[in-house]
Amino acid sequence: MDSLTQIVLGAAVGEAVLGKKVGNKAMLFGAIAGTIPDLDVFARFLTDPVSAIEWHRGFSHSILFSILFAPIFGWIVFKLLPKKEASWKDWSWLMFWGLFTHPILDSFTTWGTQLFWPFKTRLAFQNIFVIDPLYTLPFLVLLVLAMFQKRTSIKRRRYNNWGLIISSAYLLLSLVLKAITYHKFTQALTEQGIEYIEIDTRPSPFNTILWTANVDTKDAYLIANYSFFDTKPITFESYPKNHELLGDLKNNDKVNRLERIAEGWYIITKDNGQLFFNDLRFGLMSMDPKEKNFAFKYQLTNTQGKLDIVETPKNVGDAKKLMRELWNRILGN
């Protein structure tokens, strides 16, 4: 999830664990713990793009990381604070839950997490977008209300608990919505006589009303959208896989690693002689059925046997256009 959401979750967990003893300091250090796993984004400055993608939501988002580093961070906090209102064990317990709940929440997103690192399995339930105001804003409001109550106040605990309950309930609701939309997509495929190998569904940005399906067929991927306000049948747009365009690069280690990252959901496109690797899992840059530009797109440049992979920059104008189109599409087809 986005940084604000993880800060809010970490602060609420910190309050639940230690708020009665140390007051708002529990929220502060819970928020810090909830931020730490995402420091892996700085890997992009230390290594190549493919390795940076692999590291993101890897070790720092694992159970192992939480267990190993919670006592270390707990000891640092214990030593830093002159007033010993809580023990080293208390602070370690707070840090553990702040670190651990971060990847748990991330596992519900499209990117997912390697919760069981060093095993390569990536958990990605894909039932909530990385930024969802309906999850975050009520949670944030209740956390702020709790912050201004005395540490021993019953209201403080109630506000914080309700924030945790409401956000968790919304997360569970999104799983139900995913199941309903999955049925809608598979039903449409059956009714239209479309044979498929696999289907992958996820919510569109910032909401759980409009959902997208990627459908794997023999030579192409189909992409479709469904809103709970739709009145017309679901339509599927075809995108040729074009994997053969890779040629000898099909056996390149970097390309193989990108394929594993995309979990097989990718197409290859060619523009002015340049190859592009398009990751389908994060959708298109427009709601236009004929859109060909994907949100995560990597340029493959092979120079004298050396392959360079660079993520293509996202256009701010395209993002604004997508937001306008997204709102219109949420309201129905």
Image (cartoon, grey):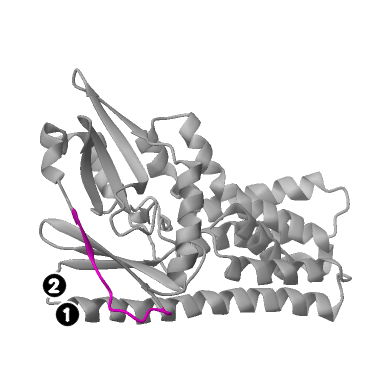
Residue 263 at x, y percent in the picture = 27, 54
Dot 1 lies on which element? Answer: helix
Q: Position of residue 328 (x, y in %)?
A: 46, 67
Find numbered disc 2 in the image and state the secondary structure of the residue it sits on.
loop
State which region is magenta: 228-239
Q: Is residue 227 above or below residue 200?
A: below
Identify the mark at residue 194; answer none if there is no mark.
2
Give the residue type at disc 2.
Answer: Ile
Q: Amino acid at mark 1?
A: Thr
Is residue 139 in view from this perspective?
A: yes
Relative placement, left or right, of 181 versus 208 is: left
Q: Is residue 129 left or right of residue 156?
A: left
x and y percentages locating residue 319 in the rendered image: 48, 49
- Disc 1: which residue: 190
Q: Is 235 positioned to the left or the right of 37 in the image?
A: left
Q: Residue furthest top?
A: 304
Dots 1, 2 in contact, CB < 8 A: yes
Q: State the image quarter where residue 236 is shown.
A: bottom left
Disc 1 to disc 2, C-alpha distance:
6 Å
Task: Mark 2: give few (<14), some (14-19) or many (20+) Cα within 10 Å.
Answer: few
- Residue 63 appears in the rendering: no
Is the residue 48 above or below the residue 218 in the image? Answer: above
- Magenta span dominant secondary structure: loop
Is-magenta flag for residue 151? no
- Quarter of the image that includes the C terminus: bottom left
In the image, is 316 to the left or to the right of 242? right
Asked whether 238 or 109 is in front, the reply is 238
5 or 220: nearer the eye? 220
| Near-viewer residue (281 or 324) | 324
- Whether the magenta-drawn stretch holds residue 232 is answered as yes
